[in-house]
């Protein structure tokens, strides 16, 4: 994920510098990683692995994200 984000930042800077780059080259990896991560979070939540403290932390984190 970090490499995909770094590639996206590099592509954006290169685009600002009027260099030809493929601006969407990092998007597939970003989508795949985010999808797999959310799949695991949902599985853990449905399996009952999240304690009340973890549920509260996820809720607060999501609210801060918004």
Image (cartoon, helix red, strand yellow):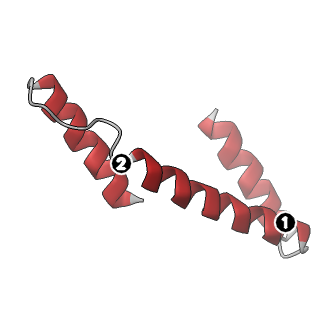
Q: Quadrant of residue 17?
A: top left
> Element under label 2?
loop
Q: Quadrant of residue 53?
A: bottom right
Give x and y (percent) for residue 63: 70, 38
62 lies left or right of 44: left
Placement of the N terminus among the 4 image quadrants: bottom left
Classify 64 as above or below 29: above
Q: Which residue is mark 2?
A: 26
Nearer the camera: disc 2 or disc 1: 2
* For marks 2 and 1 on the same chain, the one whose residue lies earlier in the sequence: 2
Give the residue drawn at x 91%, y 73%.
48
Mark 2: give few (<14), some (14-19) or many (20+) Cα within 10 Å: some
Mark linked to residue 37: none
Classify 34 as above or below 20: below
30 lies left or right of 18: right
The number of numbered discs placed on residues in the rendered structure image is: 2
Mark 1: give few (<14), some (14-19) or many (20+) Cα within 10 Å: some
Distance in Å between CA atoms under marks 2 and 1: 29 Å
11 lies left or right of 29: left
Placement of the C terminus among the 4 image quadrants: top right
Give the residue drawn at x 68%, y 58%.
38
Give the residue drawn at x 9%, y 30%.
19
Give x and y (percent) for residue 10: 20, 42
56 lies left or right of 32: right
Q: Quadrant of residue 40?
A: bottom right
Give the residue drawn at x 73%, y 54%.
58
Give x and y (percent) for residue 57: 72, 56
Q: Which residue is mark 1?
A: 45
> Element under label 1?
helix
Q: In this orientation, which residue lies closer to the viewer: 32 or 56?
A: 32
Q: In this orientation, which residue lies closer to the viewer: 13 or 64?
A: 13
């Amino acid at each position: 994920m970090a490499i995909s984000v770094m590639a996206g930042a590099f592509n954006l800077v290169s685009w600002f510098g009027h260099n030809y780059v493929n601006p969407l080259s990092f998007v597939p990896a970003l989508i795949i990683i985010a999808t797999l991560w959310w799949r695991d979070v949902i599985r853990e939540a449905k399996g009952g692995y999240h304690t009340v403290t973890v549920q509260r932390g996820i809720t607060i984190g999501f609210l801060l994200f918004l």
